[in-house]
Amino acid sequence: MGVRDCEKELGNDMHHFFVAPEQIGEKKITITGSDVNHIRNVLRMEAGEQITVSGGEGKEYRCEVLVLEPDRVEAGIMWVQETEAELPSKTYLFQGLPKGDKMELIIQKAVELGVYEIIPVATKRAVVKLDKKKSESKRKRWQSISESAAKQSKRLIVPEITSVMSFREAVEYAAGKRRRKDCRSQKGWRKPGICLRALYRGSLWQSLSDRREVSRRRKQSWLRQKGCSL
């Protein structure tokens, strides 16, 4: 058996798609939306070809294409396997808005590396300024990039790209996920959750405000009220 045959047997060269849990039946899966056009007209798949499908529940379905209609594709479930493709801890990326189209590359690589959710943050010193309309348009574009990267890397979920937040909103959002003190176990290993310290790393810290405007002590005091510390 050659390398190509081995990859086909393992499903490494198969096209991967995402569906909602309600689209998964006992014996078949129904694919709708833009993926139908992609399967029929771009990939030009035919009945009998195999694909992999994920419903965002930690399972991967090996399927055989049965029916190709203009509005849907039906695939029969061959077998189901629970994989450990996702990281044991949910990683939340708080990303300051960069210039140009760098955000698209960041999202692509972050999804491929296993990030669970990406939160764009509009910082005070950032060059990029988005109004509400542009922000939502960008978010939809970024979400499609996240889905494409998830398919390419065969993730079991499509990481969500949230609406653009201010720094204060981002900290409150992070505090609502998990407190700083819950990020480590007694032995020092990280638990599933989020550490607010990540908000201050890299260029994000530099772009928040210079020390003449807001002192480090005031920042620490405000964060303590939110249940965390630097």
Image: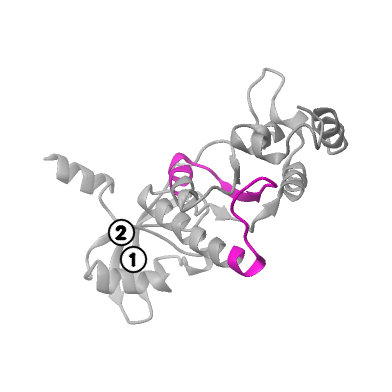
Residue 47 is tagged as none
Q: Which residue is mark 1?
A: 76
Image location (x, y in percent) of residue 40: 27, 73
Image location (x, y in percent) of residue 47: 23, 70
Neighbourhood count class around disc 1 (C-alpha, 10 Å): few under 14, some 14–19, many 20 upward: many
Tell me which residue sits at (63%, 38%) in the image: 204
Image location (x, y in percent) of residue 21: 52, 63
Residue 84 visible from this viewpoint: no
Nearest the viewer among 227 and 14 is: 227
Badge 1 amino acid = Gly
Tell me which residue sits at (46%, 61%) in the image: 144
Q: Which residue is mark 2?
A: 51
Neighbourhood count class around disc 2 (C-alpha, 10 Å): few under 14, some 14–19, many 20 upward: many
Q: Which region of the structure is painted magenta?
A: 108-135
In what element is the residue under mark 2? strand
In the image, residue 24 sits, relative to residue 222, either above or below, namely below
Q: Is residue 223 left or right of residue 30?
A: right
Quadrant of the rendering where the C terminus is positioned: top right
Residue 114 visible from this viewpoint: yes
Residue 182 picture quarter: top right
Tell me which residue sits at (74%, 48%) in the image: 173
Q: CA distance from mark 2 to mark 1?
A: 10 Å
Residue 201 picture quarter: top right
Most extreme residue toward the bottom is: 70
Badge 2 amino acid = Ile
Tell me whether the residue at label 2 lies in contact with that at label 1, contact meaning CB atoms closer than 8 angstroms. no
Which tag, 2 or 1, sits closer to the chain's start? 2
